[in-house]
Image (spheres, rainbow, N blue to C red):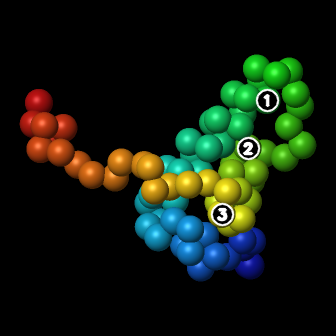
């Protein structure tokens, strides 16, 4: 089974698979909420659109905080 876009293409923009999952999920939620607010009908599934945006380099992941602080581990 061939997947499009290829994982190597996605990893050019998001180097970590786990981060990729989070980025796509967040962007898909954003797209879904925007369509709902504007009363638009989506032509494709939000996850598909989000993956395509990542593959095209339209999503900037440099601003996402990927660090884990000691405070978040101790509760």
Could you give the CA–CA distance between mark 3 and mark 1, rounded to whole angstroms?
A: 21 Å
Q: Is residue 64 rendered to the left or right of residue 5?
A: left
Say if mark 2 contacts mark 3, CB within 8 Å: no
Q: Earlier in the sequence, mark 1 or mark 2?
A: 1
Q: Which mark is residue 5?
A: none
Residues under labels 2 and 3: Cα distance?
17 Å
Q: Secondary structure at mark 2?
A: helix
How far across and down, in percent of the image, does residue 66 sit? 34, 52
Q: Which mark is residue 35?
A: 1
36, above or below 16, in the image:
above
Mark 1 residue crowding within 10 angstroms, few (<14) / some (14–19) / many (20+): some
| Label 1 close to label 2 by CB (< 8 Å) | yes
Q: Which residue is mark 2?
A: 46
Q: Nearer the viewer, mark 3 or mark 1?
A: 3
Residue 21 in view: no
In the drawing, does residue 64 fall left or right of residue 7? left
SS category of the residue bearing label 1: helix
User: Which dot marks residue 57?
Assistant: 3
From the top left corner, tell me how far across and down residue 27 is, in percent: 62, 44
Quarter of the image with the N terminus in it: bottom right
Note whether 2 is above or below 69 in the view shown: below
Residue located 12% across and 44% down the image: 70
Classify 74 as above or below 37.
Answer: below
């Amino acid at each position: 089974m061939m997947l499009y876009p290829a994982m190597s293409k996605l990893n050019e923009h998001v180097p970590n698979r786990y981060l990729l999952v989070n980025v796509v999920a967040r962007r898909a939620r954003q797209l879904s909420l925007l369509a709902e607010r504007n009363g638009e009908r989506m032509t494709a599934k939000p996850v598909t659109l989000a993956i395509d945006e990542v593959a095209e380099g339209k999503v900037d992941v440099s601003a996402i905080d990927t660090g884990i602080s000691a405070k978040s581990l101790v509760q």
